[in-house]
Image (cartoon, helix red, strand yellow):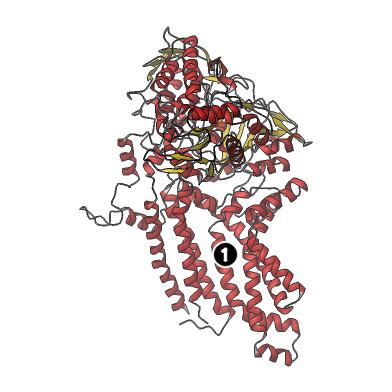
Amino acid sequence: MSFRKPGKRSIGWLLLLVLMIPLIAACGASATPTATVASTPATGGEPTAAATTAPTDDTAAATPTEAAAATEAPTAGNADDYLVFGGSGEPDSLDSMDTTTGTALIVTRQIQESLLGFKPGTLDVQPELATKWEPNADSTEWTFTLREGVKFSDGTDFNADAVVFNFQRLFVPDFEFGFRAEGKQYNIVPDIFGGYAGDANSAFKEVVAVDPTTVKFVLTRPVPLLPSYLAASYFGISSPEAVKAAKEKYGSPEVGGVGTGPFKFERWDAGQSITLVRNEDYWGDKAKMPGVVVRFIAEAPQRLAELEAGTIDFTINLSADSRDKIASSAELQVVDLTPFNIAYLSLNINNKPFNDVKVRQAVAYAINKQEILDASYGGVGSIADDFLPDGLSDYRPSDLESYAYDPDKAKALLAEAGYADGFSTMVLTDGTELPLELWYMPVSRPYYPDAKSVAELYAAQLSDVGIKVELKTEDWGVYLDNWDAGLKNGMVMLGWTGDYGDPNNFLFTHFGPGNADEAGYANEEVWKLLADAGGATTPAESIKLFQEAGKLINTDLPRIPIVHAPPVLAAKKSLQGWVPNPTGGESFAPISITK
Amino acid sequence: MLGYIFRRLLGIIPVLLGISLLVFTLLRTIPGDPAIIILGERSTPEQRAALRTKLKLDRPLYLNFEGGNVFESQYVTYITNFATGDFGDSIKTRQAISKELKERFPATIELALSALLIAVVVGVTTGVVSATKRGSLLDAGSMIVALLGVSIPIFWLGLMMQYLFSVKLKWLDPSLRLDTSLHGTFKPITGLYLLDGLLLGRFDIFTNAFKHLIMPSLALATVPLASIARMTRSAMLEVLYQDYIRTARAKGLSARITILRHGLRNALIPVITVIGLQLGFLLGGAVLTETVFSWPGIGRWLLDGILARDYPVVQSGVMFVSLVFVLINTLVDISYRFFDPRIQFK
């Protein structure tokens, strides 16, 4: 008997394992946690809030064993009474300014408050750490009056210096306490402000402390929507002393975050959960429960199972088909949230015949959105006439063409365009003729919970007017990469979830210059209108310009808006006071539960 | 014997060197510059350059032929640091990798050992019973079950178990190693919570950890169980028809003693090989089981490291897992001597 043989065999297996590394890496290429920036125009459709199957950041964590385990018991209340939230993944950091993932921001919102917040359940701005805010005549300077007597949970004072410190960290590339060379990123800044201080396109000039309770933002151009931006969770204010002490490790599992919020960071158990305890010195209404445990549960079926088992109290991003099951349960409730997303079908304008606007409009008339809503979304949600969700309906043109289902009109338009018998191929720019492709996403997102079934409906409806498609899909990472690179031809299904109350978060993101490559739509008039609308000095003018741009997009129709789908949120029936925000940035303080 | 052990241990070094070279090269073949991944695509070239210098990614890859110390290269630094026990810091969490390993690995060990325990006890018993009752309904039945064990996706099995035992019956907890309310109420000694519970006299922790461990270890046990059962059966069948078994029976030994002492003992070598291999696999982390049961083990940790291009985590993590794997196989080889005295090591 040879006793060497097993050894050799095992090494072979080991090599095989090692060789799988690049495969795994390739599969997850664009799904890396750092890539889930909701508002990056370049990644056409990987929103923050849509973290259902987004990567979990297991590695982000490691228990502060020594430090935290020494704390024998939680500081307040009984740990059995803590709320348990089923989060959809592990945060990458608890430094609110240095993360863009929804799984992290929902936690930082409880710890670090922003200057402004959202009124419960809406996109309307309300006071948080600032009590008053005022622009100058052309919105290039904004003055914020700060709340007095507020302290960070480490006992240091919240004042104008603290605010300036935080925004210098965020905006000023060579700021001493920015720790950029050590890896801090502040990725959200270019997305919202066009660049950091000193960059050519940056809207930000400086932030100054006028007196201990007044700060002034000086901008390079009018930014009428500054309050909406600053209400987002990205701009949570941290204790300067905590940042200076922890340096680049601020926000990491061993340090956590320190802010003024209703909860304080207590511990972070690698791969499992983050525990927050009530801030007993909170300036506002104190949290109803003594603490919150945020669990990391990446998969939607898992979250549902834990909710049904009673091990979590409330959760987000469940699949659409679980809605009925939850609603009929004796112990659970569906928690409603106005949809703040868009599911769309993009047509590649570089391909014939989609270069003809009549063909694009014909496709829109051929699609029966109501049938899709009923079949794939349980009839819940609203049919989309344009990209803006209902929360931003003020900016919607009043005379939108809704392209309501009308197969006859579709056929007539096709005939006008020279395709009376329909078509089944597409011609690329280099003259190659290929079967017409319709790409559906391999993953589930709140806007397309079951992309394949919707794709099959599209195919059937299009076939009724003579358009024959071939359904295709591929690995999600490759799907997004190819989309970004403009390599996806034919029709492509994608969607978007917004993260702050700005029409450009939907419009510029999809029809701006950064998106011309994806499917060939480049209308400079639209670009200018959107940029001007974002910088308009009065709300009325901003609305007017957005509506003009919306009208052009509505006619050009490079991407067909389909539905605004409500995400499925659920809680135990005994849970009260949870008012989810469309941006995912609500406080857990008012939530209570009888255990 | 000692010489053999020494030579085997020495043989680990080239294996690890080979693996390190492979991991190192593969990681650098994957597209994606860690500096861009860490700093974001909007970072300035200066910021990226500064970070590359800090992470020593600006050094030559294998050997430095650009003047200066020839060993001042990324690969040599990696190898020498690993050899001296310096695993580096995770790029993503900015924590020491040794610290993360210390937290993650005990979770994996606890799960792997309990799964293996179930697999060995049930697998060997099933194997022996089916071999002795060859061709019976019991044999066919248990081999079908073994086949199912290999074929059923763990992910599905885990979900079904959760549904039955957590959602419907509410007997067991669907995930984690402990209830979250027990987190932070004790200072782990070994990191194996069952053991810690006993050592600290905290029986609430012991029973709670046990309840949390049942489902994941049962789910994970199905795979090694099936191979152990089938391997035991075939090895037993081979042995049971040997002359010495007939002799044993002829001299009046009971069937039980013959099968266990003369049969099983001789059939053990291939079974132990399988068990050793399986343990090596299990200690490398069980990504699917860890995902379904939110188990904070090493499998997901490594997977996420790969996804985030966390070079130090993947390099040190894979080396660590490989070291464990190779060590266990060496131990298995050495253990043959104790199960079969005929084997002589030279």
Whether B85 is drawn above or below A113: the answer is below
- Residue A237 shown left or right of residue A173 in the figure: right
- Residue B308 lies, with reference to residue B221, above or below; the image says above
Q: Is residue A497 visible?
A: no
Residue A514, percent across and down?
40, 29
- The residue at the far left in this view is B67
Residue type pointed to by label 1: Leu
Residue drawn 51% across and 69% down?
B329
The chain holding disc 1 is B
- Classed neighbour count for the residue bearing mark 1: other residues with Cα under 10 Å, few (<14), some (14–19), many (≥20): many
> Percent from the top left, x then y, of residue B19?
41, 62
Q: Position of residue A255 (x, y in %)?
A: 50, 37
What residue is shown with label 1? B279
What is the secondary structure assignment of the residue under circle 1?
Answer: helix
Residue B67 in view: yes
Q: Residue drawn 70% across and 65% down? A: B145
Task: Work out which quarter of the rendered image holds the C terminus of chain A and state it.
Answer: top right
